[in-house]
Image (cartoon, rainbow, N blue to C red):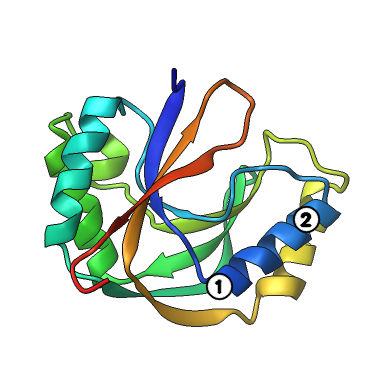
């Protein structure tokens, strides 16, 4: 039985591989790089099925990843921008049938998480941030998102894994 799931989108494979290799150097094992579009709160197999059903009706879109940013000293991330990303997010929130959380209503900040302070790593927070800026500070990448991805994990503490890819219209 699945413990937790969420819906996200994947970055290009080469950028994802570079981020994972960098995370390995930090001994920082977190979920495969992704941009969350529907977080785990309230997700169930039924909610996932409703979200899966709307994806073929939503158009593929351009997404820009750039700029190393932080949420205070909790998260290091790449900024994610794209009008289609917000459309996908709201479409999934509506399709879920769940009440929108405060983060989904007004506080949705699309991002690709690279470091979570609550997970172990072999460097300090300032060192991780400096390293992220050195490795990924010049990233400015626009690509076409052709699918939403269902990520799942079976137990707490385990990284999420890709369970399904749901093609978007034109994807």
Q: Please give the name of the residue rendered at 65% of the width and 45% of the height, measured from the top-left corner.
A: 73
Q: Going 37% across and 70% down the picture, which residue do you hit?
A: 81
Q: Is residue 49 left or right of residue 5?
A: left
Residue shown at 11% from the left, 60% from the top: 57
Can you see residue 80? Answer: yes
Where does residue 146 sit, x and y in percent of width and height? Answer: 32, 68
- Can residue 101 be seen? no
Residue 161 appears left or right of 117: left
- Quadrant placement of the N terminus: top left
Task: Give whichever of 65, 13 is nearer the camera.
Answer: 13
Q: Position of residue 20 (x, y in %)?
A: 70, 58
Q: Please tell me whether mark 2 sits on a helix, a strand or a loop.
A: helix
Q: Give the secondary structure at mark 1.
A: strand
Q: Which residue is mark 2?
A: 128
Residue 108 location (% of width, % of height) = 32, 50
Q: Between disc 1 and disc 2, whose residue precedes?
A: 1
* Image quadrant occupied by the C terminus: bottom left
Label 2: how many residues lie within 10 Å, few (<14), some (14-19) or many (20+)?
Answer: some
**Relative vertical location of residue 97 with respect to residue 58 in this rendering, above or below:** above
Q: Residue furthest top?
A: 1
User: Residue 42, relative to residue 103: is it above or below?
Assistant: above
Q: Are discs 1 and 2 less than 8 Å apart at CB?
A: no
Name the residue that disc number 1 marks. 67
Q: Is residue 52 left or right of residue 108?
A: left
- Residue positioned 76% across, 61% down in the render: 21
């Amino acid at each position: 039985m699945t413990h937790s799931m969420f819906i996200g989108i994947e970055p290009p494979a080469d950028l994802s591989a570079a981020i994972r290799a960098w995370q390995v150097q930090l001994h920082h094992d977190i979920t495969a790089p992704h941009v969350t579009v529907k977080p785990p709160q309230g997700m169930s197999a039924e909610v996932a099925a409703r979200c899966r059903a709307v994806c073929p009706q939503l158009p593929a879109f351009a997404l820009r990843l750039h700029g190393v940013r932080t949420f205070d000293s909790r998260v290091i991330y790449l900024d994610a921008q794209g009008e289609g990303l917000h459309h996908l997010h709201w479409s999934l929130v509506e399709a879920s049938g769940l009440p929108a959380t405060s983060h989904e209503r007004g506080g949705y900040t699309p991002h690709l998480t690279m470091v979570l302070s609550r997970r172990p790593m072999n460097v300090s927070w300032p060192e991780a941030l400096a390293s992220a800026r050195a490795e990924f500070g010049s990233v400015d990448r626009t690509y076409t998102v052709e699918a939403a991805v269902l990520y799942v994990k079976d137990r707490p503490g385990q990284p999420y894994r890709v369970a399904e890819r749901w093609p978007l219209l034109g994807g």
